[in-house]
Image (spheres, rainbow, N blue to C red):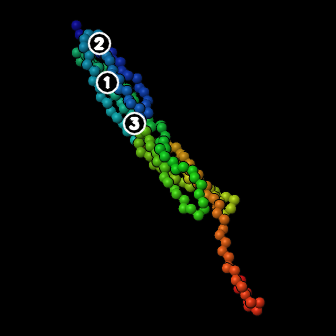
C-alpha cells in the first residue's frame, strides 16, 4: 500500500487592501486521504513604487506523512490610494493695506507616510491702489502622489482716510509777503 496522493490545500483568497488597513492573514487548511498533514508558510514582501505600495506573497505548502506535497500562493496587494488630510489651514482674514500680512503655514497628515506641502500665491488687483486680494493655495502630497488642496483668502483694504496737515493760522501786515 502506497500513499502517492498529495494533500488537498485550501488557501485564503487574494485581496487588495489600503495601506492603513489591518491586513488579514488567514490560515490555510489541508486534508489528506491517508493521514496527517503539515502546512508550512513562507511570506515575502516586495516593495512597490512608493512607501505605501507593496505586495505580500504567501506560499503555502501542505505535506503528508508520505512526503507528498502541494503548494499554492496567496497575493496581498497593498496600496496607498488615500490623499493626505489637512490638520490645519490658515483662516481667511481681512487686513488694512498698511498692516503686515501674517502668512501662517498649513499642516497635513497621511494615513501611510510623510506629507509635503507646497504653497502658491496669487494676488488679484482690487478697485483702488490699496485694495487687493491674496489667494494662497496649499497642496499636500504624500509619498505615492496622492494630493489634496485647500485655499486661504486674504482681503486687503484701504479704509483709512488720508491725514491732512495744514499750516497754522497767522496774522500778517498788508504789506508783508504771504507765506503759502
Residue in the foreground of this view, choosing between 125 and 69: 125
Element assignment for label 1:
strand
Residue 22: image x %, image y %?
A: 38, 30
Which residue occupies 49% across, 49% down?
A: 106
Query: To which quarter of the image does residue 142 belong?
Result: top left
- Would residue 86 be visible to someone looking at this image? yes
Disc 1/disc 2 C-alpha distance (Å): 15 Å
Residue in the foreground of this view, choosing between 142 and 159: 159
Disc 2/disc 3 C-alpha distance (Å): 34 Å
Disc 1/disc 3 C-alpha distance (Å): 20 Å
Q: Is there CB contact under 8 Å for labels 1 and 2?
A: no
Q: Nearer the viewer, mark 2 or mark 3?
A: 3
Q: Is residue 105 left or right of residue 44?
A: right
Location of mark 1 (residue): 60
Alpha-carbon neighbours of circle 3 within 10 Å: few (<14), some, or many (≥20)?
A: some
Location of mark 2 (residue): 32
Residue 54: mark: 3
Which residue occupies 74% across, 90% down?
A: 173
Element assignment for label 3:
strand
Amino acid at each position: 500500500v502506497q500513499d502517492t496522493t498529495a494533500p488537498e490545500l485550501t488557501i485564503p483568497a487574494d485581496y487588495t487592501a489600503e495601506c492603513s488597513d489591518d491586513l488579514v492573514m488567514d490560515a490555510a487548511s489541508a486534508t489528506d486521504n491517508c493521514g496527517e498533514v503539515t502546512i508550512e508558510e513562507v511570506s515575502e514582501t516586495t516593495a512597490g513604487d512608493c512607501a505605501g505600495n507593496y505586495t505580500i506573497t504567501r506560499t503555502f505548502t501542505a505535506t503528508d506523512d508520505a512526503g507528498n506535497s502541494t503548494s499554492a500562493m496567496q497575493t496581498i496587494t497593498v496600496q496607498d490610494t488615500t490623499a493626505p488630510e489637512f490638520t490645519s489651514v490658515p483662516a481667511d482674514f481681512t487686513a488694512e493695506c498698511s498692516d503686515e500680512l501674517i502668512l501662517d503655514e498649513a499642516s497635513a497628515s497621511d494615513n501611510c507616510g510623510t506629507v509635503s506641502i507646497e504653497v502658491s500665491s496669487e494676488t488679484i488687483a482690487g478697485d483702488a491702489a490699496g485694495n487687493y486680494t491674496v489667494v494662497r493655495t496649499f497642496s499636500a502630497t504624500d509619498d505615492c502622489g496622492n494630493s489634496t488642496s485647500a485655499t486661504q483668502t486674504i482681503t486687503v483694504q484701504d479704509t483709512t482716510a488720508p491725514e491732512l496737515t495744514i499750516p497754522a493760522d497767522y496774522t500778517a501786515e498788508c504789506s508783508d509777503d504771504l507765506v503759502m
